[in-house]
Amino acid sequence: MELKNEYIDERTGITYTKQGDYYFPNLTIQKDTNFTIGRYGKAHLRHIKQYNKPLYTDLLLDGRLNKYLHSIDEKCNSLLESIITKLAKQENVTEELKANHQLEWVARMNNIKNRAEEIVYNEYVYN
């Protein structure tokens, strides 16, 4: 009796293909690769791979990982921009300072950016 090269399991609806003497299920993961992942999304990916394997596995198997990392990246960039704007206004780092004292403006803006990035990493990336 010759076995079929493909068959469909009536209960599950999964199609199987014969490879040698064995039947293997034709399973694929839906990939949502239309999203770009930036710096914060990549950092969050490293974090969940190391410290939150269940979340990583769940997102990967459901095909939602790329979209999830993209949304984290967007939130982080938006929050970073907002924090930098607020801190610059609070600390009176203005365009006038930039025009008159460029090196001081650069130093102060770098300080603000570093503090804002630390907040973003603690709130979204490593949380």
Image: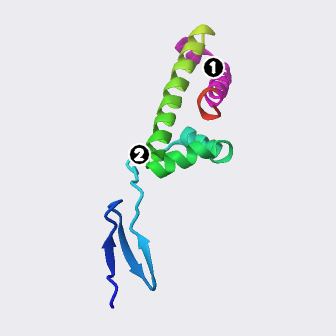
Which of the two discs, 2 and 1, labels the residue nearer the N terminus?
2
Q: Bounds of the magenta span?
A: 94-122
Query: What amino acid type should be assigned to the residue bearing mark 1?
Result: Trp
- Of residues 71 and 90, the one drawn nearer to the viewer in this rendering: 71
Asked which quadrant contains residue 113, the reply is: top right
* Dot 1: element: helix
Quick one: quadrant of the C terminus? top right
Q: Disc 1 marks which residue?
A: 105
Residue holding disc 2: 35
x, y (%) of residue 8?
A: 31, 69
Indicate the amino acid at tag 2.
Phe
Compared with residue 13, is residue 113 higher up or lower down, i.e. above or below? above
Foreground pick, 72 / 96? 72
Expressed as whole percent of the image width and height from the top left, the position of residue 124 reads 59, 30
Residue, x 62% and y 26% (percent of image)? 123
Q: Quadrant of the N terminus?
A: bottom left
Give x and y (percent) for residue 74: 47, 33
Q: Residues within 10 Å of mark 1 (few under 14, many from 20)?
A: some
* Direction bottom: furthest residue: 1
Q: Secondary structure at mark 2?
A: loop
Of residues 57 and 88, the one drawn nearer to the viewer in this rendering: 57
- Depth check, mark 2 against mark 1: the one in front is 2
Q: Residues within 10 Å of mark 2 (few under 14, many from 20)?
A: few
